[in-house]
Amino acid sequence: MSANEFSSPQYFHGTKADLQQGDLIGPGYNSNYGARKQAAYVYLTATMDAATWGAELALGEGRGRIYIVEPTGRIEDDPNLTDKKFAGNPTKSYRTKEPLRVTGEITDWQGHPAEQLKAMKDHLERLKEQGIEAIED
């Protein structure tokens, strides 16, 4: 599927997990980020850029994947990327305690340039060394 075939609002989830249409992505698994503790939320976005970061930065084996998802419950702004770092929610990033249902997969997405990806990974490593982790309240 092409990213241009969808109408708004469309939600995405970037990961390395190999999922199928109809699968549920829910909290309760080890997070892909930080200390990898059990995640209280599952994250989604309405932008391909944020989903691309999710697919590129996710831990695990295999290639990054971007799934089209639909929330099964209430979603809220992701405080990791909203008012604490940016005014409002320019990345259109959200979180939920309810599962996301996979409705499709974007197969023609383009990753960030290698130098931009390295800079982001270096930044995340510096945050980890400082003890700064994702917000899970």
Image: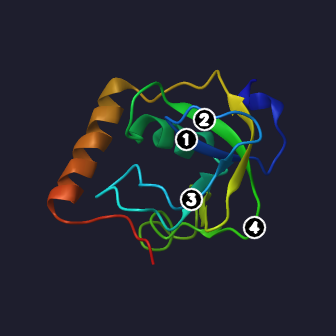
Element carrying mark 2? strand
Residue at screen point 43% across, 35% down: 56
**Residue 88 on image: x %, y %:** 57, 70
| Quadrant the N terminus occupies | top right
**Residue 121 on image: x %, y %:** 28, 41
For marks 2 and 3 on the same chain, the one whose residue lies earlier in the sequence: 3
- Measure the C-alpha gap from mark 2 to mark 3: 14 Å
For marks 3 and 1 on the same chain, the one whose residue lies earlier in the sequence: 1
Q: Residues within 10 Å of mark 4 (few under 14, many from 20)?
A: few
Mark 2 or 4: in front is 4
Mark 2 or 3: in front is 3
Element carrying mark 3? strand
Residue 42 disc label? 3
Name the residue that disc number 2 marks: 66
Compared across the picture, whether 39 is left or right of 43 comes to: left
**Residue 62 on image: x %, y %:** 44, 25
Do tag 1 and tag 2 residues touch (Cβ < 8 Å)? Answer: yes
Element carrying mark 4? loop
Name the residue that disc number 1 marks: 14
| Quadrant the C terminus occupies | bottom left
The residue closer to the viewer here, 88 or 128, is: 128
Residue 73 disc label? 4
The residue closer to the viewer here, 137 or 19, is: 19
Residue 60: quadrant of the picture: top left
